[in-house]
Amino acid sequence: MKIRYDSEEDIVTIEVSAEKIDHAEEIGPIIMHFSEQGKPVLLEILDASEFIAETTKAMAKSKGGEFTEVLA
């Protein structure tokens, strides 16, 4: 797994596989790239600084170790 941050574009890229990318799906600031077999290959988080700050705030509000779903 490789994780990169582009500070000029404010994008976090997480490479989870070396497979060839076939297609991608975008949900809010997240773009997930998949192989032809539908396996995750690459995850991009756009506006990463804002996304991580909001996620951190939501997690801090969580009580007693409960899971909190964050929708961007």
Image: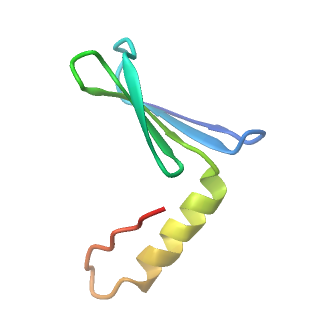
The image shows residue 42 at horizontal and vertical percentages of 42, 29
Residue 71 relative to residue 49: left or right: left
Give the vertical position of 30 relative to 38 (above or below). below
Give the vertical position of 42 relative to 19 (above or below). below
Which of 38 and 59 lies nearest the eye of the viewer? 38
The image shows residue 67 at horizontal and vertical percentages of 27, 73
Residue occupying image coordinates x 50% and y 52%: 28
Residue 23 relative to residue 47: left or right: left
Residue at the bottom extreme of this rendering = 63
Residue at the right extreme of this rendering = 8
Q: How did the renderer colour the structure?
A: rainbow
Residue 71 appears in which quarter of the rendering? Answer: bottom left
Which of 37 and 53 lies nearest the eye of the viewer? 37
Give the vertical position of 51 relative to 20 (above or below). below
Residue occupying image coordinates x 40% and y 17%: 21
The image shows residue 14 at horizontal and vertical percentages of 47, 35
Give the vertical position of 30 relative to 6 (above or below). below
Residue occupying image coordinates x 41% and y 29%: 24
Q: In which quarter of the image is the N terminus?
A: top left
The number of numbered discs placed on residues in the rendered structure image is 0
Residue at the top extreme of this rendering = 20
